[in-house]
Amino acid sequence: MSTSLIATVAVAAPLDKALSYLVPHALREQARVGVRLRVPLGRRSVVGYLLGLAEGESAGLKEIKEVLDEAPLFPPEMIPFFVRAADYYGHPLGEVIRTALPAGLSGRGEEVSIRRENYYTPAAMAGEPAGARQRELLAFIRERNGAPLSELRRAFTAPHASLHRLVEQGHLTEAEVEVHRDPFLDAPVPADCPVTPSAEQAAALAAISVALDSGSFSPLLLHGVTGSGKTEVYLRAIENALERGRTALVLVPEIALTPQLVGRFRARFAGRGGRIAVLHSGLSEGERYDAWRAIARGEAAIVIGARSALFAPLPAPGIIVVDEEHEASYKQAEGFRYHARDLALLRGQMAGGVVLLGSATPAVTTYHRARSGQLGYLPLAGRVEGRPLPAVELVDLREARPEGDSSLSPPLAAALEETLVRGEQALLLLNRRGFAPFLLCADCGTTFRCPNCAITLTFHRGRRQLRCHYCDHIETPPELCPGCRGSAVEPQGAGTERLEEELSTLFPAARIARMDRDTTARKGAHQSLVERMLREEIDILVGTQMVAKGHDFPRVTLVGVVGADSSLNLPDFRSAERTFALLSQVAGRAGRGETPGRVLIQTYSPDHYALTCAAGHDYEGFYQQEIACRQALDYPPFGYLVNLVLAGNEEPKVLRAAAALADGLQRAAGEAEVLGPAPCPLARLRGKSRVQILLKAPERLPLRRLLARLPELRKKIPSGVALVVDVDPVDML
Ligand SMILES: [Zn+2]
Ligand SMILES: [Zn+2]
């Protein structure tokens, strides 16, 4: 009996196990581990991922129909990582791999038109050219270690003739390079000015070098206050990794919001043999596929991207940096609900690399790990150049009441006035977009709610719309109250749109701009706001938490937080942690230049430890209080959670299914607690009724045992009710 070539394939379908297929003779050459395949499954044909090849018995096996990629999309070393991730999150392996690969990879990669342009690098040649203009050009190119024509055109008018002469004389070499249509490439690259590391930075770097040399898994927490120079540590640590012939993976919370950070990486590594691949949502599907294949071919030494870049096919990264590791956006909110920071630790462990978690406000669970010795601890307690942290004042709204409909307390209004008089910039945070969070009829109490979700519709005055911020349902606000036919319908509370309007009335001469999801939806809009801030064309920037992220505006001397209470009062055990992190982060935007900064936080809860500790720049104090609450309630890090959410159109059916599931789980619970079923805080979302069951245990093992029973219990859930399994949930709403 002859043997055949058998492929192990994970199909992109909710199946527990990988399947075996016969590789037909015609496809033997193309079938390599890491490519996508088209395979039959029942009567359908589905996409699968080739995980292994072996000679074996072919009886009863179906044949692979088609090989979809010319070259593997991931190296074989990543397969055990995918398997562990699938196992940990209780998610089908094929779905895990599908999530890991770039979105939109449904068929073959589309053809991408590649643009090319000239790139000039300085030649190793002594002497200077004759003309002043040529000398100027050459100095510019030398400073950058090479520059493409497009950049030179921006900096000099008609540089062609001079460039030509410089090449002829041997001062420059000219080469054609591929240009990706990449919004980040169009962003000006800041001059790279590496500073001498501070004593703290040097100590952190020394520890990272030791870890790199050890060649074994080294998880580290870089705990640096805002403005302490964490990025410089990342850059130098990556240089050290590259010098050792290793590669680097850098994760940032939202790539579109971090052009300055990406710019610094470009400035440091461009033209130094450290090719950088930036994975971001601005790439078309084809470009993303190309970037992915280039990484898989080993052409990139550094990959930068948001959450999903964690899966970039870099062979054995020597260092994985997770910037702002506490950010909730590292958790995928649907489908395969992984946490990129946690999987970065797993990947680093399997690759024997350094995992560097950076934050000014580490997650409570992360800091707890550092304190218990599971993570190395690298503190940066001081700001660069000894700049002081800004003075933070809490404004008690019960005493310093804003007048009438105003959102601004007298102290904040006065501080804005003073800042404008001094010609400096201010940043105002109000974490709610739109004009007003709801409309209310003062006569009959009518409000306007989303028909699909259990929340009120937000009023957007500019567009004259009532919008649901969850499902994007849109209505036109009525002229008269639908309840009483009266005309007393008024916007209640304030969002960023209303605050912007109030500011322009209050300070008519000031240049005011708004940064939120509504004003930055257009491509490039966010970056243009950042650039206008840097050029000081804006006096007051109003915005949602977007304004708190990663910007370095040296002329901002006043930061105001208009309302700190909305995030504090969310029904989620992490609300204090999130509020503390957000306030610390936005406060850190003040006084990053030479002028010291001032921060005013308006609140109704000035005694809450999340606020007092943020005001005192006291992470340790916050941690001590928060960890005590967690311990009292067995929340992470003292307990582990799995959230099961059942959702469906018919509420009674969802409730029955949830009760039956909870009952089944209860019987198998062992040491785990089964809490609920209870309605989710958002009991209706996008037209579905939602009920949750929370599983809680002091160790992971009882939860894993319980999850192992799910496939069997799942069978009893009727059609029309969906079950979502969320291991280590972050969003509990
Ligand atoms: Zn009414
Ligand atoms: Zn809705």
Image (cartoon, rainbow, N blue to C red):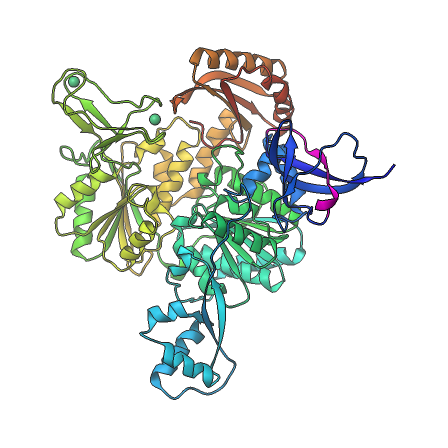
Q: Residue furthest right?
A: 1
The N terminus, quarter of image: top right
Q: Nearer the viewer, residue 186 or 623?
A: 186
Q: Find residue 55 and report its image quarter.
A: top right
Q: Nearer the viewer, residue 400 or 91?
A: 91
Magenta segment range?
14-28
The location of residue 231, given as percent across then percent down, is 46, 56
Q: Is residue 576 left or right of residue 525?
A: right
The location of residue 77, given as percent across then percent down, is 67, 47
Point out the quarter of the image occupied by ligand 1.
Answer: top left
Magenta stretch encompasses residue 2: no
The C terminus, quarter of image: top left
Confirm whether residue 518 shows in the render: yes
Confirm whether residue 411 shows in the render: no
393 is higher (above) or lower (below) than 723? below
Q: Find residue 38 and report its image quarter.
A: top right
532 is higher (above) or lower (below) than 415? below
Magenta stretch encompasses residue 16: yes
